[in-house]
Amino acid sequence: MPAKIVETRPRPFKRLKIDPITLDIIENAMLNARHEMDTVLFRTAMSPGIREQHDEFPMIANLDGKMVVGQFGSFIYGFKAAYDGTIEEGDMFLTTDPYTCNGAVSHSNDWLLLRPIFKDGRLIAYAAMFGHMTDIGGKVPGSLPTDAQSIFEEGIRIPPTKIFKNDVLQEDILEIILHNCRMPQWNRSDFYAIVAAIRTAEKRVIEMSNRFGDDTLYSALEDLLDRNKRAMSKLINAAVPTKKQYFEDYLCDDGMGMGPYKIKCAMWREGGKVIFDFEGTDPQSTGSVNFLLNEEMFKMFCGVYMIMVFDPQIMFNDGFYDLMEVRIPEGSLLKPRFPAALSCRTHALGRIFDILGGLLGQGNPDFLCAAGFSDSPHFMYSGYRKTGEWYQLYSIGFGGIPGKPFGDGPDGHSLWPSFTNVPNEFLESYFPLRIEAYETLADTGGAGLHRGGNALRVGYRFLEPGQISIHDDRWLTYPWGVNGGLPGARSRKIMIRKNGKKELLPAKCDRIPVAEGDLLYFDTWGGGGWGDPLKRPADKVAFDVEAGLVTRDGAKRYGVVVKPNGTVDEKATTALRAKMAKKRGKTKLFDFGGTIPELKKACRKETGLEAPKTPVFQTWAKPRAEGSKGGAGKKAARKVA
């Protein structure tokens, strides 16, 4: 049964006609409240993942749970569909288990808190936020084990739980949860910070309702959702063809020596609705790279991508969801059955955006973006200081942003909407390490009319013994280029031991011992290039060389000869470009850098690592089932329209 709303003074809302000025005031007040949630969180959280990197996602939703303002929405739909208890005034819910909230969160490190907002005894809105906790227990520090084969190895799982009842904290429940974490002081602080952010949103929504009236607020939120739906409807009809488009991409490996794993999707439009069908995606993995992709969450990903590419002026919210239908096969990499491991789902999550780019751009190549949101690389470092104090770092790395129709991709940047790096000064102040390199790597961005962003290198010098974990991808497959653009460079991780010995580390590994004096070079991937590199203005290439973004040898990928003094050799450039164009022939719509068999065959020579073996897919005799009130098993196979 779905959640039951308990209102002490229930009465229906009236849909009013809202004038444009009032609507604009309420819209901006809601946006301000959403950003105030972030400000409260960042000033009170302790973990660098939330405090510094902003690995959190707030939202304010209408009384049906549809996000009106926020960063990444759609939490509430999955929660309400799975939770069969009551939702009452004074409640605040906490959940971390993807299987008991229909994938509203997709791995257990993300703590989702949700607050129904009541006024005068009736529900008027929701506020919610989730943040990534640095540690939730499990078999490795950071709780993201690359070799986990079930979710039970990944840390404590919290089903939908009333952590506040009648505005009273259930302290015994919270203490049990924190008892399972390696950094309970961080988790406690981050938990209270999220609670404070949500209460801030609640206060602002009630203030708006008092100022304008309940019916006006209700109607304004509906109008904002409707406006988004109208705008997205026009966008879908203009950008999505009725003919099926197909695209597939691959996760390189699962951290257990197997791969690559295929993600395949078809897209087409029927009437005013766009349909996405993931039939042909590989079965779920034995390892932890599975991604329990909530259908509503995918709609949100798609909406964000379309708005950013086609019309950034559109205010993003959940109003357009009934214009999309998402079909994900049960038991696949994107709809694994319980208790499949999920902790390292970030690689598939990031790859979804590359796939969206490949799908949405085929019908109109002028709007096609190259690959570059290929992953969200993680680095973890932990151990005991000489003083006996435990230290534990979790951080997210950045890569090269792909070339795009209207310009170059930024170098060493994040495609997540509001993520930032952890300042090096912070890292060196709070952790036993020194940052000896923080730079973009020349020539790692794919060559193109619009250059792909360069990869980022961070050099970590370890000052205390400990262990590290690395989670990354795009070490076997390339971030592909489009419209004649070349692929970006692949990622790699190089350890230089204090005795000078060099080791090439896998892209996914845990519990790698490090000694005082060891140095790790953490190199991410470059973004794919956009457009014919032979058409990039030679003076731009010369500027890139001067800026250290492209080497003189790298300039020749663009057919440009740069003299030692930094000027362009016009005659040599003209000759080289003519020769390259003749040899190359017609440009490719997509340049993947080779087929999967070709990449695997050349793997060791090109990357220094062994090619992954053909995956052994995980199968379960019964559908995903939990035996809990969430009832996720019986609901997970649904198609959401």
Image: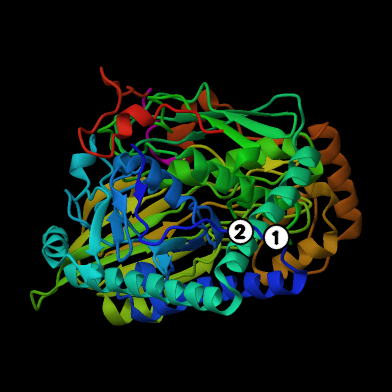
Which residue is nearer to you in this view: 259 or 283? Answer: 283
Around disc 1, counting alpha carbons within 10 Å, would you say few (fewer than 14), some (14 to 19), or many (20 or more)? many
Q: Residue at x 46, y 56 (%)?
A: 523
Q: Residue at x 19, y 73 (%)?
A: 185
**Residue on which the image places disc 1:** 552
The answer to if 97 sits in the magenta stretch is: no
Amino acid type of the residue that numbered disc 1 sits on in the rendered structure: Arg
Distance in Å between CA atoms under marks 1 and 2? 67 Å
Relative placement, left or right, of 534 versus 514 is: right
Which quarter of the rendering shows the C terminus? top right
- Earlier residue among tags 1 and 2: 2
Q: Are marks 1 and 2 in contact (CB under 8 Å)?
A: no
**Residue on which the image places disc 2:** 14
Instruction: Please provide percent x and percent y for residue 634.
Output: 33, 27
* Up-down relation of residue 286 to residue 523 (above or below): above
Return the mark for residue 214: none
Instruction: Please provide percent x and percent y for residue 425.
Output: 39, 81
Callout 1 secondary element: helix
Amino acid type of the residue that numbered disc 2 sits on in the rendered structure: Lys
Which quarter of the rendering shows the N terminus? top left
The answer to if 608 sits in the magenta stretch is: yes
Callout 2 secondary element: loop
Which residue is nearer to you in this view: 616 or 535? Answer: 616
Around disc 2, counting alpha carbons within 10 Å, would you say few (fewer than 14), some (14 to 19), or many (20 or more)? few
* Up-down relation of residue 524 to residue 263 (above or below): below
Q: How many marks?
A: 2
Relative placement, left or right, of 458 versus 468 is: right
Q: Which residues are magenta?
A: 607-614
Which residue is nearer to you in this view: 548 or 100? Answer: 100
